Image (cartoon, grey):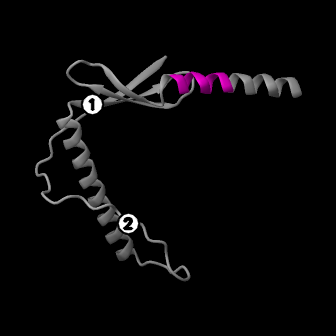
């Protein structure tokens, strides 16, 4: 039912930041829209990439400390991406997103919608 497309294992980062992380603030633009020059866009993209790298590093450290793995797969019937959190010592699935119940419910709802639309045609 589920086609396994990959596993992500926790990797300890080269250096763990000693400071506590601060949440990323998103600010809405003030006033009218203005054109950014390419240098500003490049600088913002670099800052965003560095911030993302830091978050990924912290998540990898946390996952490593908790002895957890993330496994990504695709459900063959629905085409939905499924993420499983697995205990690396016991291979037990700790959590699945979306859950098996949600996957089954989506399938039933799609079948019901098909019957309803066939009947109204």
Number of marks drawn: 2
Q: Is residue 121 visible?
A: no
- Residue 12's place in the image compared with 18, above or below, is above
Q: Quadrant of the C terminus?
A: top right
17 to 120, vertically: above or below: below
Q: Residue furthest toward the right?
A: 121
Residue drawn 24% across the image and 55% down it: 54
x 44%, y 21%: residue: 3
Q: Residues within 10 Å of mark 1 (few under 14, many from 20)?
A: many
Identify the residue at image location x=37%, y=66%.
25
Q: Position of residue 110 (x, y in %)?
A: 68, 26
Q: CA distance from mark 1 to mark 2?
A: 29 Å
Which label is found at residue 25?
2
Task: In this rendered view, identify the residue nearer to me: 99 or 33.
Answer: 99
Q: Nearer the viewer, residue 76 or 27?
A: 27
Write down the region rendered in magenta.
101-109
Residue 91 is left or right of residue 5, and the answer is: left
Residue 16 rendering spot, x and y as whole percentages:
13, 52
Crowding at mark 2 (Cα within 10 Å: few <14, some 14-19, many 20+): few
Image position of 11 with respect to 106: above or below? below
Which dot marks residue 69?
1
Residue 77's x, y, as percent? Answer: 56, 21
**Residue 93 in the image, given as x and y percentages of width and height:** 34, 22
Task: Say whether marks 1 and 2 touch (CB < 8 Å).
Answer: no
- Judged by depth in the image, the label closer to the viewer, 1 or 2, is 2
Mark drawn on residue 18: none
Identity of the residue drawn at 86% across and 23% down: 119
In the image, 73 versus 112, the foreground residue is 112
Disc 2 element:
loop
Q: Which of disc 2 and disc 1 is earlier in sequence? A: 2
| Residue 32 shows up from this direction | yes
């Amino acid at each position: 039912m589920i086609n396994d497309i990959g596993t992500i294992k926790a990797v300890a980062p080269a250096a763990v930041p000693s400071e506590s992380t601060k949440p990323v603030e998103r600010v809405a633009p003030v006033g009218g829209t203005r054109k950014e020059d390419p240098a500003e866009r490049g600088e913002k993209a670099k800052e965003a990439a560095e911030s993302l790298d830091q978050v990924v590093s912290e998540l990898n450290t946390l996952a490593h400390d908790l002895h957890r793995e993330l496994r990504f797969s695709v459900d063959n019937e629905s085409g939905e991406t499924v993420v499983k959190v697995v205990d690396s010592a016991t291979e037990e699935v700790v959590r699945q997103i979306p859950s098996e119940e949600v996957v089954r419910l989506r399938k039933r709802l799609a079948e019901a919608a098909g019957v309803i639309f066939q009947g109204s045609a």
